[in-house]
Amino acid sequence: YSINGFGVAVSLEQDGNNSTAVTNDITGVGVTYAMDMGGTAITLGAGMQDGAANIDISGVSVKAAMANGITLVANTSDESTGASSSIKRTGFGVGYAMDALTVGFNWGEVDSTTNSADKDGYGLTVNYDLGGGAVAQLGYAKTDGVGTGPVADPSTMSIGLALSF
């Protein structure tokens, strides 16, 4: 539901219905507020999820979309996975759109009380609107701290054409 820049969302996921297993129902609540500050659209958000296997997550985000085509985004969340385990996620992104070209860069980090889950990575995207609903897309991503062996720190690349009818 939204009115005058304020928005709220509530969700419930039911798991394990009609079974003898323990249910892991998950509830979520999120709120947003959007405002215009002299040509820059600011959106603030906060949310939380509670449920499955004692996992609780809460997070906040902020987005600034400027009239010059630059968009900045930052977010953070904390996940409690039990009495002695937690995970903190942090992410930043910047995008620029001009005419048919859109370029985006993001970086994110996962910091866990169990160091085996620590990782960080970044991504880069370039899209070019060809017109008529066709967009050429290119992407690259690199992740560090995923595991061991030949795919310990994978990087991926994609190229394609998105079509909208």
Image (spheres, grey):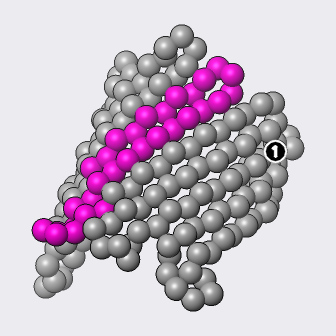
Residue 85 inside the magenta-drawn segment:
yes
Q: Residue at x 72, y 34 (%)?
A: 97
Q: Position of residue 41 (x, y in %)?
A: 52, 22
Along the horizontal axis of the image, is 154 left or right of 42?
right
Residue 40 image-quadrant placement: top right
Vertical placement of residue 93 versus 123, above or below: above
* Residue projecting furthest to the top: 38
Give me the residue at 34% from left, 41% from top: 60
Q: Nearer the viewer, residue 83 or 116?
A: 116
Q: Is residue 14 something that shows in the picture? A: no
Prevailing SS of the magenta stretch: strand
Which of the pair 71/164 is nearer the observer?
71
User: Within the magenta stretch, is there residue 83?
Assistant: yes
Q: Quadrant of the N terminus?
A: top left
Relative to 148, does residue 48 appear above or below in the rendering? Answer: above
Q: Quadrant of residue 71?
A: top right
**Residue 86 horizontal side relative to residue 43, left or right:** left
Q: In front here: 112 or 126? A: 112
**Magenta residues?**
58-87
Q: Secondary structure at mark 1?
A: strand
The picture places residue 84, in percent across and down from the top left corner, at: 16, 69
Residue at x 39% of width, y 31% of height: 44
Q: Which residue is mark 1?
A: 128
Corner quadrant of residue 72:
top right
Q: Vertical placement of 42 versus 162: above or below?
A: above
Q: Does any portion of residue 85 appear in the rendered image?
A: yes
In this picture, residue 91 sits left or right of residue 44? right
Around disc 1, counting alpha carbons within 10 Å, would you say few (fewer than 14), some (14 to 19), or many (20 or more)?
A: some
Camera-side residue of 65 and 155: 155
The amino acid beneath tag 1 is Tyr
In the image: residue 60, left or right of residue 35 = left
